[in-house]
Amino acid sequence: MKLFMDCNKKAIHSFTKPKSYEGKGKQTVSQLVKQGHGVTNIEINDKNIKSFESIARKYGIDFAVKKDSTEQPPKYLVFFKGRDADAVTAAFAEYSARQLARESKPSVLNMIKDLMERVKHQVLDLTQNRNRGQSL
């Protein structure tokens, strides 16, 4: 019975023991620094940081995002491991290409607003034509 209790204690201790965090993807800056691989950063001025996060996850980059709100508009610092530099370069190139493509597309909301303004100023002819006879 004592042997069984000792085994249960060891099993419970192994499940509750804190593990070192060797995470993937988005992390905090302190978790990234604790991994000991060296940290570098890049600066992004765009407010649409979520699109960069999805691309970074696609390339398997361990990264942390920190918002610097001291400037107006706020800028974002993206920290990543030094060994991921090549992957970050590729991810950042894809991110900037995606942003340029997004800017070159016309805004659907603006097009709808323009059409609504045009329709608002048109005079609609609501008179019914009752002359349904044969025309010669």
Image (tube, grey):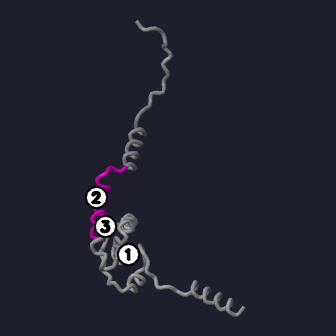
| Residue situated furthest bottom in the rendering | 2
Q: Is residue 50 left or right of residue 2?
A: left
Write down the residue under mark 2: 100
Residue flagged by tag 1: what amino acid is it?
Phe
CB contact under 8 Å: marks 2 and 1: no
With respect to residue 85, does 15 lie above or below?
Answer: below
Residue 120 painted magenta: no
Viewport quadrant of the N terminus? bottom right
Spatial separation of the CA atoms under disc 1 and disc 3: 12 Å
Crowding at dot 2, Cα within 10 Å, few <14 / some 14-19 / many 20+, comes out as few
Crowding at dot 3, Cα within 10 Å, few <14 / some 14-19 / many 20+, comes out as many
How far from the left and from the top, in percent, is residue 60? 37, 70
Please state which of residues 127 and 83 is positioned toward the viewer in this rendering: 83
How far from the left and from the top, in percent, is residue 95? 31, 63
Stretch of the chain drawn in magenta: 88-107
Res 102 visible? yes
Dominant secondary structure of the residues highlighted in magenta in the image: helix
Residue at image location 46% in from the left, 85% down from the top? 20
